[in-house]
Image: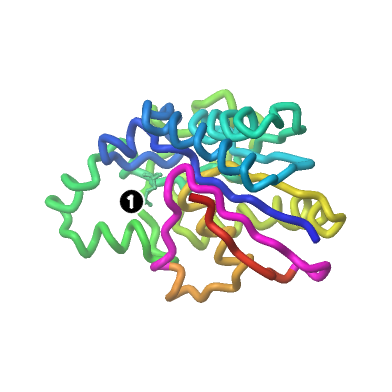
Amino acid sequence: MAKLVLIRHGQSQWNLSNQFTGWVDVDLSEEGVKQAQNAGKLIKEAGLEFDQAYTSVLTRAIKTLHYALEGSDQLWVPEMKTWRLNERHYGALQGQNKAEAAEKWGDEQVHIWRRSYDTLPPLLDANDEGSAANDRRYANLDPHIIPGGENLKVTLERVMPFWEDEIAPKLLDGKNIIIAAHGNSLRALSKYIENISDEDIINLEMATGEPVVYDFNDKLEVQSKTKLN
Ligand SMILES: O=C(O)[C@H](O)COP(=O)(O)O
């Protein structure tokens, strides 16, 4: 039956400098480009062929998708971009260095902000100049939907309509899909796909640029999960 490949973007410039990123549109680092190109090679070696590609509206994920498709000779595959696959919004933490934040608020608090399922980060005000409300790419969204900060639970709630309306029907139709997105939007999706508990999702990490392949049966139950590396 259908296959789904999830790929977290390659290392970004702010992964490298250890800054909270969220919806800030930073580019891939040199290493991130190499990781994405290597993902394309691994996809080709595995013989994976896609019918449809999805990504977020953030450069690091879009470029990762393109490198992965180019490396597997599938740059022609139809693609759709949606804010629903964006990284979780990291609120007022965006731009801050993660190690400095841990010194300021303590390791435990920062770990809770980063990994707890339902604790929100400090929120970013809609009037803040860094608010996504000032960004043209979200101009068609109801301003009430634009987050000032998200936890994994809220992220899952905004990823799910896209899964239900767009991705699941295609998989049920036997189409092979690739999704290039972000550490936390993909953790949210994996939580749903694999039925991982609120407690256990804390331990799931996504490596940058590493394709994860799911095989589904015709009831959309996971038959296997393989990491390509
Ligand atoms: O948005 C970010 O800072 C990262 O992409 C994911 O960060 P995390 O691993 O701290 O959640």
Q: Is residue 113 above or below residue 135?
A: below
Q: Amino acid at mark 1?
A: Pro
- Is 215 inside the magenta-drawn segment? yes
**Quadrant hosting residue 190:** bottom right
**Quadrant hosting residue 79:** top right
Which residue occupies 59% across, 45% down? 85
Q: Is residue 191 above or below residue 178?
A: below
Work out whether residue 25 or residue 221 is closer to the camera in this orientation and state it.
221
- Rendered location of residue 51, percent (x, y): 79, 41
- Rendered location of residue 227, percent (x, y): 53, 56
Location of the N terminus by quadrant is: bottom right
The residues colored magenta run 202-220
Q: Which residue is mark 1?
A: 122
Which residue occupies 65% across, 34% down? 72
In-image side of 47 versus 197 (left or right) = right
Give the secondary structure at mark 1: loop
Quick one: label 1, few (<14), some, or many (20+) residues within 10 Å? Answer: some
Colour pattern: rainbow
In the displayed orientation, state which residue is furthest to the top.
Answer: 136
Work out whether residue 23 or residue 120 is closer to the camera in this orientation and state it.
23
Work out whether residue 84 or residue 37 is closer to the camera in this orientation and state it.
37
Work out whether residue 91 or residue 204 is closer to the camera in this orientation and state it.
204
In the displayed orientation, state which residue is furthest to the front.
Answer: 45
Which residue occupies 64% across, 33% down? 69
**Quadrant hosting residue 225:** bottom right
- Is 205 inside the magenta-drawn segment? yes
- Rendered location of residue 74, percent (x, y): 71, 31
Q: How many badges with numbers are in the image?
A: 1
- Rendered location of residue 38, percent (x, y): 50, 36
In-image side of 207 versus 218 (left or right) = left
